Every structure is written in structure tokens, then in C-alpha cells.
Amino acid sequence: HSHFATRPLPACFSATMSSKLLFASCAIAAVATARAEFVEPVVTGDVAFLETFSGGLGSWSGSKDAKYNGIPSVVTAKHTEDLGLFVDTEARHYGVSSVLAAPFDPADGLVVQYEATTQDGLECGGAYLKFLNTEEKEFSVDTLDGDSPYALMFGPDRCGGTDKVHVIFRHASPAGVFTEKHLASPPRMPNDKLPHLYHLAITAKGDVTVKIDGEAVFEGSLHDEHVFEPPFSPPAEIDDAADTKPGDWIDDPQMDDQDSVKPTDWDEDAPSSIPDDDAEKPEGWLDDEPLQLEDPSAAQPTDWDEDEDGTWEAPIVSNPKCDAAPGCGEWPRPTKYNPDYKGKWYAPRVDNPLYKGEWSPRKIANPEHYVDATPLASIGKIGAVALEVWTMSSGLVIDNVLVAQNDVAAKEMEQVWRPKFDAIKAIVEADEKAKFAEEAKPEEPGFAARVKDSVAGGLFAIANVMPGAVRDKATAFVTTLSESAVSLFAFVALVLLVALLLLSSLFGGKDDATPATETKKAVGKKKKTDEPTPDDKETELEEEEETDEEPLKSPSTRKRAARKA
């Protein structure tokens, strides 16, 4: 009827792969794309309602009540191609329902079943469905609210101390009064993110079976007064609320023996332990030595100011003589059990001749008593199915909702669910293994760490070429620096700065003097080797004009200026 399978894994999953880290990377990539393929199920059993959501929301519609701020949608569930009704946002109320083609009468048997997946986990919220009694009160999907009467509420719920799979019927008495009947010992819901199958079956005889993932987790009967609270058939007798226990009622089965007296040699004040007179002080015990004394090697600090710091006191240390001896100071005599100790005396207990038994109020006829031989006929007809929940968790997916009279179709849908569950479970387990392998990978050092290691390595190399004691001190200094990247980089930056300053002080003035010196050499050379040319004369005249404009700073300059003039 259906088929589920995981898609093939990527080519990197080969038999020759030897690297675990490469395998982990491939596993993560494969898990991200692995999905369970799905083919629309086909059932042959009779059903009153079956919704697979393959066609989207279809007949499902959200309530128009302003309370329901969660928007229902149909999406592809995680790790599968199967569509489901999706709760996508936490801290919202959701109210969405679908009306059956015709009201279903559960009197001859009732089977409800659906899948619920809490993809993001469920910390606080409901994942149950309500099967509505649309005959008790006129109903439409637009008017769905928390007071819409239901025949059955079934499914998981978790919040705080609540962790159960609800089975609650709204049952009408012969007088037409509806009362909620709760399964007294409901099973707990699974605590994972897999798609689980919730199944409830009640036969016409009243036999109840609750299954999770095809396994029975509860079996009982609607007619057992201990299975549901309160029971479907109220008891014939009840306690008389007006009855009270008589004042002389003795409900203690035993009493103190009035004839018993405390023995004359019974000393209640005797201690439970006494000094052991047979014990002897260990040899070498130093009675006159204190356990602690002032540290004789301590000296008052030179900067101690008694006006500000108070009177200086030497620190207290253990007495070294006591460390080598059995003990110091007063020797404490050990104690032993007191053979005469008896404690407080109590009279022995004997049977109470006036004991009447445990009191309970008398029974009277229950005016509300009746026997419901067919409880399912008194819960009303199911006319709609609703998801009406409040949740603090997102990611709930509801799928393959079924209502039927027998379990034929339910078993067929279980065969649809099983391979999907197995496929998704395998994907989730592979995902967890891949994440574990990824987390187990050694962390690659960052760029800063690699630079720090390289710089430290260079400094260690320099330190190792230094002689003797200098090498040891240098190595210790570099070791201390390498413990902190900030300290190491700061030291290197300081060394570079000092080096630049030294270079600047040694060679910084040469650039300013060089042009003048070269100019003088060039001019001198020209005077020695070149013959005057017209261009040289013009240049010389320009130089002379510039010289006239400049201040006369030396005798030679003044003489040349005078000759030219």
C-alpha cells in the first residue's frame, strides 16, 4: 500500500574510506539531504474519517475566535516527503478542525489513531486531539473554542509535572449530566523527536486498549470502577457525610501495659558513653606543647605602620614538634560504650481490649447510582475532529488521523507508519553519530594562534643560541610570554619599535646633508673640467642674482659679492 526508503548516500561513503573525519563530514552532508520517500497510503477497512493531509488543509479550517493566534498549515515533515498538519510557532493557541462527512456513533466500537511528531521536542504543550460531539451543541469550524463539547480527548500532553497520554471521555448520565471520565493511570508519552503512533480502541463490550507504536501500554475495561475516575457507573453505596466518629471510639489496636512499672535499677540519666579508664596516654605525648604557635621565622614588614595597620602579629603555624609526636596539649581520654546505659523507660505495649477497629462512616444508598451497560452510547456521536491546544513548543506535526469502528484500517495505517518510523529513526541516529564525530574532531587553531606559535618558536630559537645562564633566563622569559598572545605580541611590537627608533637615530640625518654635499662636488668638478658655455654664463648670472637676494652669512660670500659688484 505504501513505500518508505531513505535515498542513496553520497558517493563519498565508499568502502575504501579510511578517514573518520572525512566520514563524519560525509555523514553530515548525507543526513542533511536524506529523506524517507512516501507513497499515498491506501486502506481497505471502513473508516468514518481519514485525513492524510496529502491534499493540504483540505476541509480543515482555523477557528475565527481571537484566542487562536496560531496559524495552521500543512508542510512536509522533517526527514520525510510526507505532509502533515504543522504547529510552527511556540507560545500560541491553535484551534483547527474538520467536520466528518456524517456523525459517527461509537456505541458499537470505537478506534481512533493518529501520528504525532514533536520535531523540536515538547517541553510544555498539548499534542492531543479532540473528537467533538457536534449533536450536543451546534458546531461549525469557525466557532471552535475551548468549550466546544467533545466525546473523547486523546493524545499526549506534557508540561511541568504532567507527562501523560490523555484518555478522557465526556459521559452523560441518564439525567443528561455530562461528567469527564479520566483514565486513572495514563501511560507516559515518548520523549524524543520521532513520529509516534497513538492508538485507542474500545470494543462494544467496553474493553479498552491503548497502544503507542503498536505496543499495548494499557488494557482495562470501562466497567471496572478503578480504571476511570470517576467510574462510568457510580457505586451503589457511598459514605454518609453526616456520620461522625464517636468520642469513645478506640481505633488504636495496642495500648501501654498499665500493670508494668519501671525497674528500680533503671537509670534514665545514665550516659550512653563513659571515659575509658583502661586507656593509656601514648608515649611521647607532649602535654606542655601547644598545637599551634607564632611563626618564629616571620618578621614585621619594614613598611608596617602601626598607626594605620595596627599592632603587627606574627602568623600562626603548626607546631613542628607536634608533627613528630603522637600529640600535643592536654590528652583527651577516649570514651567507650556504657554497659549500664538503658535510655528512657517506656511501658511495654499490649493488645487493647477496647479496640473496635478503624472507623469509617456508615454506607448509605447512592442517590446518583446507575449502571451504564453501554458507556460508549452515552458519550455522543463524533461529528468533527479538532486540534485545540496551547503550546510553548514549536514543531508539532499531526498526520494520518483515523476514526473507525474496528481496527482493520488502523492496522493498515500502522503498516504505513512503521517503515516511515524506521527510516526516520535511522536518519536521526546517523545525524546524532555524525554530530558526535564532528564534535570529537580536534579544533583547528585560528590565524592568531598560528601566528603566536610561529613568533614564540622564533623567540625560542633565538633564546637557544644564547650562552649558559642567559639561555635559561631567556627561555623562561619566552615561556612566560608565550602563555598570553597579548603579552607576546606586545613584546614583539615593543622590540620592533625600539629597533626602528635606533635605526632612525643612527641614519636619520644623512638624507638632509647628502644633497648639499653632492651639489658642492658637482660644482667643483664643473669648475675643474668644463669650459664656460653661453648657457653656463646665463646660469651663473641667475645664481648671482639669487645670491644677491640671500643674506650674506660668511666673509667669503661678502668678498665674492664685492668683486662682482
Image (cartoon, helix red, strand yellow):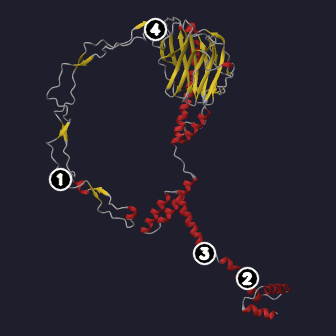
Q: Earlier in the sequence, mark 4 or mark 3?
A: 4
Q: Which one is earlier in the sequence, the residue at label 1 or at label 2?
A: 1
Residue 105 horizontal side relative to residue 523, left or right: left
> Which of pointers 3 and 2 lies earlier in the amino acid sequence?
3
The quadrant holding residue 40 is top right
Quick check: marks 3 and 2 in contact, CB under 8 Å? no
Q: Give the residue displayed 60% in from the left and 14% down from the top.
A: 403
Mark 1 vs mark 4, foreground winner is 4
Q: Give the SS element for disc 2.
A: helix
Q: Which x, y percent locates residue 531?
A: 81, 89
Q: Position of residue 8 (x, y in %)?
A: 61, 31
**Element assignment for label 4:** loop
Callout 2: 10 Å neighbours few (<14), some, many (20+)?
A: few
Q: CA distance from mark 1 to mark 3?
A: 76 Å
Q: Which type of secondary structure does the marked residue at label 3 adopt?
A: helix
| 337, 547: nearer the viewer | 337
* Label 4 – label 2 distance at C-alpha: 127 Å
The extreme right residue here reads 534
Q: Which residue is mark 2?
A: 519
Q: Residue 114 shows which numbered tag?
A: none
